[in-house]
Image (cartoon, helix red, strand yellow):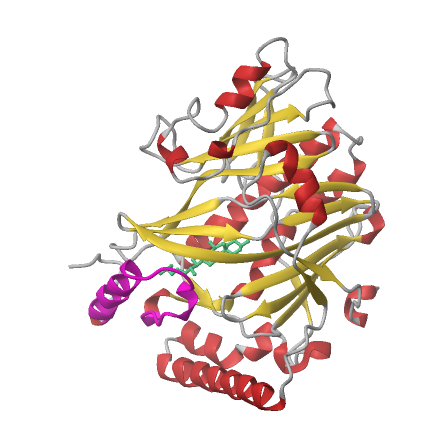
């Protein structure tokens, strides 16, 4: 039988759900899951996780261009991982299945200016329903910071776990010219059988910019000597930037699936580190991304790098949604307004209402698509324009031989609603 975390009445449907995902690949969001595993929050709210440490985000602009700024980006990025990947476990007891956003769904939010750090704003638009693709722009205008990105997921099932490959990327621009490319880690969702899913990050992701590249390798408990949620970030000057010829991390460093078993000295960092041993400027940080990390190589060796532990770390600050109960400028497409009744049903255990309301939203979507087809029109995106090629991704990704070597992008049109302008 399946685990105790599954209410007795839902064990049958949980087993069926697990069977259906085992024989399924692609867009998991479309599968119907039993009520106990449903989250009342839509995926359009997830980009808020990038912003929950606004001080660290602002600190990027204050750091000196080049290596210092690269390290500030790395520190902020690593500090977002706890919120991105463990917060549902902390808040809801386990990872849950988020609400599947509809096309055109919106989320606007802000984090106030405090101590001269500037105000951070977030604008999210669901730019595709099947497959789900979410585009977002995060800005701290006072500091000249702008992060534009999109994300989608490709899921497969392997050895009892769901493997989620994240598609898409983000580009952070400082003062309009200093660009950093950020790629996203792969996820492994374990604990399914027991009905208490949790996420482990696997393989690698990259940050490239400021004349440096970071390869961030992720490992979990039991595969090497490491603890859960371990990571190792290796920062190297890009060729021609630091005086020594670092060989960029190879394709194998980035998630072909096999890197998982390799250990720290295995597929991931091997090329990067062995090539830089000759009087290199290579910097290494190691630790657990949901807690803290320290420098393990470089001039700061032994000193703390990032810290998100509740007692000593930088504070997490929840988003202040902009919109109000009626959805404000976003109207019926504001995510919390749109899913209000479904979310209420899930929170209060009234799953009949939740499911009826969910069907109502889905039927409305189907009808809209039919009408558009009949009229020969397409749903117009409100804030973004899709482009097949992101030249910044190609340029910044080239020295580290990113796969894929090219990616698409959603360009932000700059049309902020009044609520986010001030
Ligand atoms: C995989 C996932 C949807 C996508 C979620 C993403 C990758 C979205 C982008 C955020 O920046 C980070 C993020 C965090 C989430 O952990 C991840 C979700 C976890 C589960 C969900 C699946 C589609 C649902 C699986 C159903 C299980 C839990 C039964």
Find out whether residue 172 is within the magenta segment: no
Instruction: Provide residue 28's location: percent of width, then percent of height.
Output: 40, 64
Instruction: Give the percent coordinates (x, y) of residue 269.
Output: 50, 25
For the stretch drawn in magenta, the main secondary structure is helix
Work out whether 79 lies above or below 198.
above
Q: Is residue 313 left or right of residue 412?
A: left
Asked if residue 21 lies in the magenta stretch, the reply is yes
Q: Position of residue 209 (x, y in %)?
A: 71, 35
Image quarter of the N terminus: bottom left
Task: Please give the range of residues in magenta.
Answer: 10-35
Q: Residue at x 78, y 33 (%)?
A: 63
Q: Quadrant of the C terminus?
A: bottom right
> 392 above or below 327?
above
Residue at image position (56%, 79%) is 338
Q: Foreground: 66 or 302?
A: 66
Q: Is residue 60 above or below residue 335?
A: above
């Amino acid at each position: 039988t399946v685990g105790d975390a599954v209410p007795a009445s839902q064990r049958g449907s949980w087993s069926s759900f697990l069977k259906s995902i085992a024989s399924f690949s692609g867009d998991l969001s479309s599968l119907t899951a039993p009520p106990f595993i449903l989250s009342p929050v839509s995926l359009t709210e997830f980009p808020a996780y990038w912003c929950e440490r606004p001080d660290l985000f602002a600190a990027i602009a204050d750091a000196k261009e080049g290596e210092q700024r690269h390290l500030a980006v790395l520190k902020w990025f690593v500090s977002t991982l706890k919120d991105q990947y463990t917060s549902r476990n902390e808040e809801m007891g386990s990872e849950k299945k988020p609400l599947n956003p509809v096309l055109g769904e919106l989320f606007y939010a802000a984090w106030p200016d405090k101590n001269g750090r500037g105000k951070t704003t977030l604008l999210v638009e669901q730019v595709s329903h099947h497959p789900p693709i979410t585009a977002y722009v995060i800005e701290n205008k006072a500091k000249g910071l702008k992060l534009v990105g999109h994300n989608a997921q490709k899921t497969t099932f392997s050895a009892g776990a769901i493997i989620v490959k994240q598609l898409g990327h983000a580009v952070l621009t400082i003062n309009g010219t200093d660009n950093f490319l950020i790629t996203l880690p792969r996820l492994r969702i374990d604990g399914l059988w027991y009905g208490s899913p949790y996420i482990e990050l696997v393989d690698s992701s990259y940050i490239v910019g400021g004349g440096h590249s970071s390869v961030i390798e992720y490992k979990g408990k039991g595969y090497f000597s490491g603890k859960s949620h371990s990571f190792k970030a290796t920062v190297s000057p890009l060729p021609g930037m630091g005086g020594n010829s670092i060989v960029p991390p190879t394709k194998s460093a980035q998630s072909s699936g096999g890197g998982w078993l390799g250990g720290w000295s295995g597929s991931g960092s091997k090329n990067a580190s062995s090539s830089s041993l000759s009087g290199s400027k290579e910097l290494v940080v190691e630790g657990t991304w949901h807690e803290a990390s320290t420098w393990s190589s470089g001039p700061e060796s032994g000193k703390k790098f990032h810290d998100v532990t509740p007692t000593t770390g930088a504070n997490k600050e929840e988003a202040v949604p902009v919109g109000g109960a009626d959805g404000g400028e976003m109207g019926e497409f504001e995510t919390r307004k749109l899913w209000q009744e479904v979310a209420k049903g899930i929170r209060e255990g009234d799953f009949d209402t939740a499911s009826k309301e969910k069907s109502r939203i889905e039927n409305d979507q189907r009808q809209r698509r039919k009408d558009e087809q009949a009229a020969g029109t397409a749903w117009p995106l409100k804030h973004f324009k899709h482009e097949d090629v992101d030249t910044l991704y190609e340029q910044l990704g080239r020295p580290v031989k990113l796969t894929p070597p090219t990616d698409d992008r959603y360009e932000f049109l700059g049309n902020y609603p009044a609520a986010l302008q001030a």
